[in-house]
């Protein structure tokens, strides 16, 4: 049986046999959602109390050092099973879901969360798990285990960015380089560049150039801050690159009424804002969401300049 088939079985078995997973996926069926309508697109807001540990996670070096790593095999819950891929990553069911199907895909070794050296693995996962969007949260861009390399994956058809890309109302084709299309998003509230093509090497070259230019522009440690979403569409890979300039918006740190506990990561920037507290779920407006996006993302002009060597 192939990896996708084994993952399907894993998912059903874990929901049946692992009480925590069974309860949390059950609760997802009654999750509350709001729609924020912007001019040409919409953003969803999901009230999801189970995500508090991720949204509010302390990811400073001291806090990370002081806790056992929950992605290392020796520390994982006894009930949690995995499927090992051909390239050595282990697919796990995420017990605190946002998606109806939500996976965490972890390295067998306790190695840091950096995308360098792992981009092509991400494409391989997109090819292996065809019904999923694979996503990467950088160590200061939403990953709650910045010390243990991992991707996540969720069922396709949930994040608005997928449909918005197909509709093409908010994107323009910048150029095509060695078979890889480079698309830039316009008036979408958050700067995104999308690569589409079928040759992993060509995609990797374009990504490598983007990464190097980001590194010069930002000098973030340990790597240029970014979120990445990748999936298959037809025979092509689609890769959304979302560079970041800030980990968490000012509202995250505010006191009292001004506080919004929202820590943006791939899912939020893909168009589903996750709020673990009901007060924040009710509070979010298009203005507030737009402000949060603009604080944590680059501007659309800044991002386009990073690709000028291909134009
Ligand atoms: Zn670990």
Image (cartoon, rainbow, N blue to C red):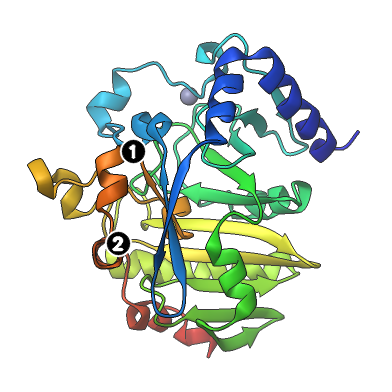
Disc 2: CA contacts within 10 A as few (<14), some (14-19) or many (>=20): some
- View extreme (left): residue: 255
Q: Where is 283 relative to 8, above or below?
A: below
Which residue occupies 51% across, 24% down? 71
Q: Where is 75 relative to 259, above or below?
A: above
- Residue 20 is at least partly visible in this image: yes
Q: Where is 110 relative to 311, above or below?
A: above
- View extreme (right): residue: 1
Find out if the beta carbon at label 1 lies less than 8 Å from the nearest ligand 1 atom. Answer: no
5 or 228, which lies in front? Answer: 5
Position of residue 201 measured from the top left corner of the image (x, y, whole percent)? 69, 66
User: Which circle's residue, 2 or 1, is located before the other in the chain?
Assistant: 1
Tell me if 268 is positioned left or right of 3 in this view: left
Position of residue 276 measured from the top left corner of the image (x, y, whole percent)? 34, 37
126 or 180, which lies in front? Answer: 126
The residue that label 2 is drawn on is 289
- Residue 145 is at least partly visible in this image: no
Q: For the residues carrying marks 2 and 1, which lies nearer the camera in this image?
A: 2
Tell me if 179 is positioned left or right of 39 in this view: right
Tell me if 258 is positioned left or right of 281 in this view: left
Position of residue 199 measured from the top left corner of the image (x, y, whole percent)? 74, 69
Q: Would you identify the image quadrant in which residue 153 lies?
A: top right
Which residue occupies 47% across, 73% down? 41
Which residue occupies 45% across, 40% down? 113
Position of residue 234 measured from the top left corner of the image (x, y, whole percent)? 79, 67
- At numbered mark 2, what does the secondary structure look like: helix, strand or loop? helix
The residue that label 1 is drawn on is 55
């Amino acid at each position: 049986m192939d990896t996708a088939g084994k993952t399907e079985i894993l998912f059903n078995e874990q929901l049946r046999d692992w009480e925590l997973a069974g309860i949390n996926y059950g609760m997802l069926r009654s999750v509350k959602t709001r729609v924020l309508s912007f001019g040409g697109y919409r953003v969803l807001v999901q009230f999801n109390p189970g995500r508090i540990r991720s949204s509010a996670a302390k990811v400073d070096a001291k806090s990370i050092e002081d806790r056992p790593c929950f992605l290392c095999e020796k520390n994982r819950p006894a009930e949690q099973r995995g499927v090992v891929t051909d390239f050595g990553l282990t697919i796990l069911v995420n017990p605190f879901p946002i998606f109806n199907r939500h996976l965490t895909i972890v390295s067998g070794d306790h190695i840091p969360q950096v995308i360098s050296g792992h981009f092509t693995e991400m494409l391989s996962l997109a090819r292996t798990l065809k019904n999923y969007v694979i996503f990467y949260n950088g160590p200061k861009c939403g990953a709650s285990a910045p010390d243990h390399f991992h991707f996540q994956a969720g069922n396709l058809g949930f994040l608005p960015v997928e449909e918005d890309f197909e509709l093409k109302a908010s994107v323009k084709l910048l150029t095509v380089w060695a078979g890889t299309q480079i698309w830039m998003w316009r008036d979408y509230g958050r700067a995104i560049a999308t690569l589409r093509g079928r040759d992993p090497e060509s995609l990797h070259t374009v990504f490598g150039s983007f990464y190097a230019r980001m590194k010069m522009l930002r000098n973030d440690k340990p790597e240029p801050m970014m979120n990445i979403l990748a999936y298959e569409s037809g025979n092509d890979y689609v890769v959304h690159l979302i560079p970041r300039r800030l980990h968490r918006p000012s509202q995250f740190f505010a006191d009292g009424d001004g506080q919004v506990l929202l820590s943006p990561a791939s899912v939020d920037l893909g168009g589903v804002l996750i709020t673990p507290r009901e007060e924040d779920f009710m509070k979010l407006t298009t203005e507030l969401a737009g402000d949060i996006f603009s604080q944590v993302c680059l501007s659309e002009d800044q991002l386009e300049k990073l690709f000028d060597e291909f134009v």
